[in-house]
Amino acid sequence: MSPAQTVLEVRDIVKTYGGVRALGGVSLTLDPGEVHCLAGENGSGKSTLIKIISGVERPDSGEIVIDGETLAHTTPTGAIRAGIQVIYQDFSLFPNLTAAENIAMLSELADRRKLSSRRRIRAAAERIVGELGLNIDLDADVEQLSVADRQLIAICRALVGEARVLIMDEPTTALTHSEVERLFAIVRRLQDRGVSIVFVSHKLDEVLRISQHVTVLRNGEVVESGPASEYTGRRIAKAMTGREVSEERLVDDLPEGRAPLLAVDGLGRKGAFADVSFTVRAGEILGITGLLGSGRSEIAEAIFGVAPADTGTVTIDGRARSIRSINDAVKAGIGYVPEDRLTQGLFLEKSIADNMVAASLDSYRGRALLLDRKRIGRSMADLFRRLRIKAPNVLAPVRSLSGGNAQRVVIAKWLDRKPSILMLNGPTVGVDIGSKEEIFAILREQAANGMGIVVISDDIPELVSSCHRVLIVRAGRLVAELAGDEIDVDRIQERMTA
């Protein structure tokens, strides 16, 4: 295809940071109406390339060409005017503004408006929300909305303008199956209008369903590129990691007779879930899944005291515990890795070490309640090494880490406290394939040492590979329990949507 027919060309982009090469001569083309998958592990250069295309960063060399015209020294606003819009993985929303204001904000700025009109903002937001067929409270402040609604608002904001090129960075992370289908329908309508889309996702089944072309980055270079029809999920995963990725079950049946570490009986909270009962044995990895809004996260938050249950009992190591707060849960021996690690699990401006020790400071106090800094240093260095956190050292700021490494820091924070039960909500959201494998290897190791693990996730393949049992939640109730050979992708999906 000639340059005149190509919407976006990325030509030999090179970018270095402090002598470290993030991109080494990356090139790709985007045709009108094409969905182009950009795949790669965290640290492969995807985010850097997106920042350069969208004007956030400038390349050391190379060109970005839109409709045959080179974008020289562009800015994010200039990129928007050129027809480039980005849906960022972390949403980048204003929490104190309404949903409607967030949706229309970039369009208002791109049009260089000095004064905003509530009527115009409302009309723009209603138009795109109606087009997507979504049910969002446009008058609610974003900070009051769920992670799923925030993701949808970020998508609406990108689509409200007349984009020629739309970059979607993990756009389906917090969406239910029906919402993903709705998004894909919108993507296809955009394709019919000639809008070109760069689709970044770790969910390879989605990539292969929606994309026409695949480009794989590894260590800042293009290692494979070609028509999506020539790829399988296994081939993409191997290109991303440089090795074969296992899709088999990686856990064996637990020995009979192990006493429960955690027993939940008749747990309920009005309007969220009811009559939830289950156990977790020492050494067991229990999966809990269901569609978004099923009550799966609310159950975990009740057990951890974030939003306590109204009814039922929680027993830990044979002792009934009253959990009315997070402090009660932590004292009872429960750790919790939350769904949104950036706002709920980490102090982004603090160092890796400060984050890892945050839940266990009291255990390092000596005489006169002073902290034993040397012991803290040894423990943090040991966790840093054991969890294979990729950073210069434990003093590096958490904000500088990739999604997979940031998640390891949250896990390390709880491992340092040595809980009996560790619950993880969406432990691999926004995490690449290689890091997913390593995170679950860490969880299997902890389970082998006697910890009880609860994984709340909608990533069904990871539940199949690593869970001894899987509980399925629908409309706030447990509707199925699968174990052993019963655990497979088709059966879980069938029970979730029945």
Image (tube, grey):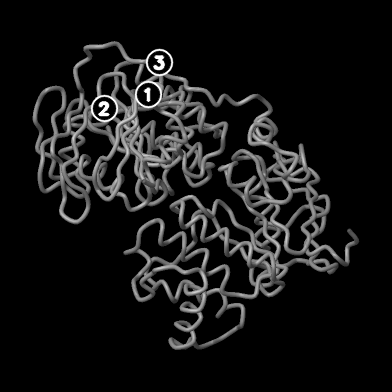
The circle drawn on residue 419 is 2
Q: Residue at x 20, y 50 (%)?
A: 307
Name the foreground residue: 416 vs 420.
Answer: 420
* Residue density around tag 1, few if under 14, some if 14–19, many if 20 or more, within 10 Å: some
* Amino acid bearing label 3: Asp
Location of the N terminus by quadrant is: bottom right
Residue 349 at x, y percent in the picture: 43, 49
Residue 49 at x, y percent in the picture: 69, 52
Name the foreground residue: 18 vs 134.
Answer: 134
Horizontally, is 112 left or right of 53 in the view? left
Tell whether label 1 touches label 3 (CB within 8 Å).
Answer: no
Query: Which one is earlier in the sequence, the residue at label 3 or at label 1?
Result: 3
The circle drawn on residue 252 is 3
The circle drawn on residue 215 is none
Residue 384 at x, y percent in the picture: 46, 27
**Residue for badge 1:** 379
Element class at badge 1: helix
Element class at badge 3: loop
Q: Residue at x 44, y 34 (%)?
A: 408
* Residue density around tag 2, few if under 14, some if 14–19, many if 20 or more, within 10 Å: some
Q: Residue at x 51, y 53 (%)?
A: 172
* Amino acid bearing label 2: Pro
